Image (cartoon, rainbow, N blue to C red):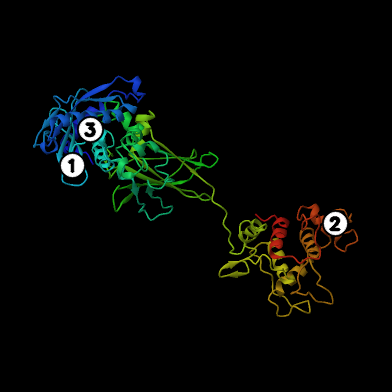
């Protein structure tokens, strides 16, 4: 439960800040054995309805205290000292004032546990209170009854452990840990309405926010393990004692004198480092940062919108209240965008900042976000990115040489055979650029009058790349085979007077030296424009598909 005493101290916030500024440099948590023990007297202020038998109460509360100390001893230097003869006080009145003049004592102050009887089926409640005496109070505890921890039935275990868990929870608050509440971060909804959307869900094993905080998942500040079922079926007191442990952050705060305030890093200069998957800095990445309220409807506010520098870094100020350990200011959502990369999102909480400062000893919080290159996306619905001709088709499209074979959806028809008319358009545009438009001239071939590609065909003939298919015709709708394509491409590159070197017949198994186009085919291979059709062959009589045409054109005209 949120510690009530912070609201009571609002009027003396300035004095607390002065005290915090005067704190010495922090001593970072070490192993419990290396730190001197800090003992605090524990007194139980109990509703008489909870204590029908003082002897039983004394015996039971010794075991309660032993269980508390068992958890504390795992990774803190705190111990609670309880005397059943003097430290059980029966009262129907609240023992603590819920006020105190700061600075609060950090050593040798008492811990009071105040519990009243409840008729509710399960014990509940709790907040971190305080008293004029400087005592830290585990206040607001509502218990159904006292138990002998050694004689618990399976049905009593949950209730007993709730009492222990809630005392551990509020004890951590008394010493300054978990302000803002870890459990407020169990689930968070991204309401920015901007992709990529990222939620927090601790119940998802792959949740990116919680995946690097496994120690939090057994911390009584986060939740009650007896209620979550984490210890597993048939859990008993021993299992709960074995599993429950304060996180490294909580233990660090408990083991130091941070009751009034803990040191904080520079919240005016939070750094974001954006790297590629290979670890190289990415300049010009757009970094957006939102504040996120930790309760429904999870309101967000854009705090920063900036670009990374040449070293891949950007910076932002945390913003919000002077002390952001509250559910309104304790969470930031960072999203990063860069053309050619998959956008990334990451949550950063004030507890991440605390870990950096108190556990790792850093003066600054640096958030490293790696971006993965965006997977290739095909412009055409019928050309997957793993198609052999995909990169050629994309370059042909980018150069404006083709608009595909249909527009709704945009398709390229890679397996469609190229006609001689289409080939004329492809070669003229590949050679002269996408903006080229052939002049309108009278037809010189007998079979192209009124044909949609008439002017392109005449331009190809005027460039002396073709003389037709014979008998004064061009055969515009006939397919182009791979042998003919070799001639067309080399003439487009070298001019109509070009004659390739004699063929050897040793390049392709299916192109002997006496093949009519052998010299052209071998020269096409020599210039790196073709590697054949596979298996050491060229397939000269095979019709050219639109996919193959894209490879021929891009390679021949070096299209970008």
Where disc 3 sits, the SS reads helix
Q: In this view, does 336 lie to the left or right of 86?
A: right
The location of residue 207, given as percent across then percent down, is: 42, 46
- Mark 1 to mark 2: distance in Å? 93 Å
Name the image quarter holding the C terminus.
bottom right
Out of 387 and 338, give the one closest to the viewer.
Answer: 387
Residue nearer the viewer, 375 or 211? 211
Element carrying mark 2: loop
Q: How far apart are marks 3 and 2 (CA)?
A: 86 Å
Tell me what residue is drawn at x 35 percent, y 52 percent: 189
Q: What element carries label 1?
A: loop
Which residue is located at x 75 percent, y 68 percent?
460
Q: Which of marks 1 and 2 is nearer the N terminus?
A: 1
Residue highlighted by disc 3: 174
Instruction: Give the residue at mark 1.
Output: 144
Above or below, 193 against 445 in this view is above
Give the label, 1 or 3, closer to the camera.
Answer: 1
357 or 295, which lies in front? Answer: 295
198 or 314, nearer to the observer: 198
Q: Which residue is drawn at 81% across and 52% down?
A: 526
**Foreground disc of the pair 1, 2:** 1
Q: Is 294 situated left or right of 133 in this image? A: right
State whether residue 125 is above or below residue 385: above
Residue occupied by mark 2: 509
């Amino acid at each position: 439960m949120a510690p009530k005493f912070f609201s009571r101290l609002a009027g003396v916030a300035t004095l607390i800040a002065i005290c915090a500024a005067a704190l010495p440099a922090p001593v970072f948590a070490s192993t419990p054995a290396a730190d001197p023990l800090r003992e605090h007297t524990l007194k139980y202020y109990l509703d008489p309805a909870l204590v029908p038998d003082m002897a039983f109460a004394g015996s039971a509360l010794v075991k309660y205290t032993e269980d508390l100390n068992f958890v504390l001893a795992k990774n803190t230097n705190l111990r609670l000292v309880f005397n059943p003869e003097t430290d059980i006080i029966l009262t129907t009145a609240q023992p603590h004032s819920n006020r105190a003049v700061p600075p609060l004592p950090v050593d040798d102050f008492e811990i009071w546990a105040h519990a009243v009887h409840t008729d509710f089926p399960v014990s509940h409640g709790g907040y971190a209170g305080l008293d004029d005496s400087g005592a830290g109070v585990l206040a607001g505890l509502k218990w159904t009854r006292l138990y002998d921890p050694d004689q618990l039935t399976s049905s009593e275990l949950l209730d007993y452990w709730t009492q222990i868990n809630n005392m551990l929870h509020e004890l951590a608050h008394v010493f300054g840990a978990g302000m803002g509440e870890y459990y407020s971060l169990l689930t968070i909804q991204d309401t920015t309405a901007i992709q990529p959307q990222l939620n927090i869900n601790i119940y998802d094993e792959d949740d990116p926010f919680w995946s690097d905080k496994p120690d939090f998942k057994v911390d009584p500040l986060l939740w009650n393990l007896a209620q979550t079922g984490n210890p597993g079926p048939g859990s008993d007191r021993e299992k709960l004692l074995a599993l429950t442990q304060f996180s490294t952050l909580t233990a660090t705060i408990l083991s130091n004198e941070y009751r009034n305030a803990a040191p904080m890093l520079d919240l005016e200069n939070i750094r974001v480092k954006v790297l590629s998957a290979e670890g190289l800095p990415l300049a010009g990445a757009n970094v957006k940062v939102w504040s996120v309220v930790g309760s429904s409807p999870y309101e967000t506010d854009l705090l920063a919108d900036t670009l990374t520098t040449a070293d891949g870094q950007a910076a932002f100020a945390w913003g919000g209240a002077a002390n952001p350990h509250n559910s309104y200011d304790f969470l930031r959502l960072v999203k990063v965008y860069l053309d050619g990369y998959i956008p990334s999102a990451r949550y950063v909480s004030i507890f991440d900042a605390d870990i950096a400062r108190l556990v790792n000893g850093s003066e600054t919080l640096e958030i490293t976000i790696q971006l993965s290159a965006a997977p290739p996306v095909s412009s055409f619905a019928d050309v997957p990115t793993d198609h052999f001709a995909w990169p050629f088709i994309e370059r042909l499209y980018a150069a404006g040489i083709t608009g595909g074979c249909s527009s709704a959806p945009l398709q390229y028809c890679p397996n469609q055979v190229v006609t001689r008319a289409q080939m004329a358009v492809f070669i003229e545009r590949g050679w002269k650029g996408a903006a080229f438009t052939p002049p309108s001239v009278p037809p010189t071939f007998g079979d192209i009058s009124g044909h949609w590609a008439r002017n392109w065909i005449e331009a190809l003939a005027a460039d002396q790349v073709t003389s037709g298919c014979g008998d004064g015709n061009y055969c515009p709708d006939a397919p182009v085979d791979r042998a003919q394509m070799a001639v067309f491409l080399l003439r487009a590159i070298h001019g109509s007077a070009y004659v390739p070197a004699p063929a050897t017949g040793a390049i392709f198994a299916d192109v002997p030296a006496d093949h009519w186009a052998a010299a052209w085919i071998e020269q096409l291979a020599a210039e790196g424009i073709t590697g054949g059709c596979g298996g050491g062959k060229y397939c000269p009589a095979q019709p050219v598909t639109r996919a193959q045409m894209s490879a021929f054109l891009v390679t021949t005209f070096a299209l970008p």
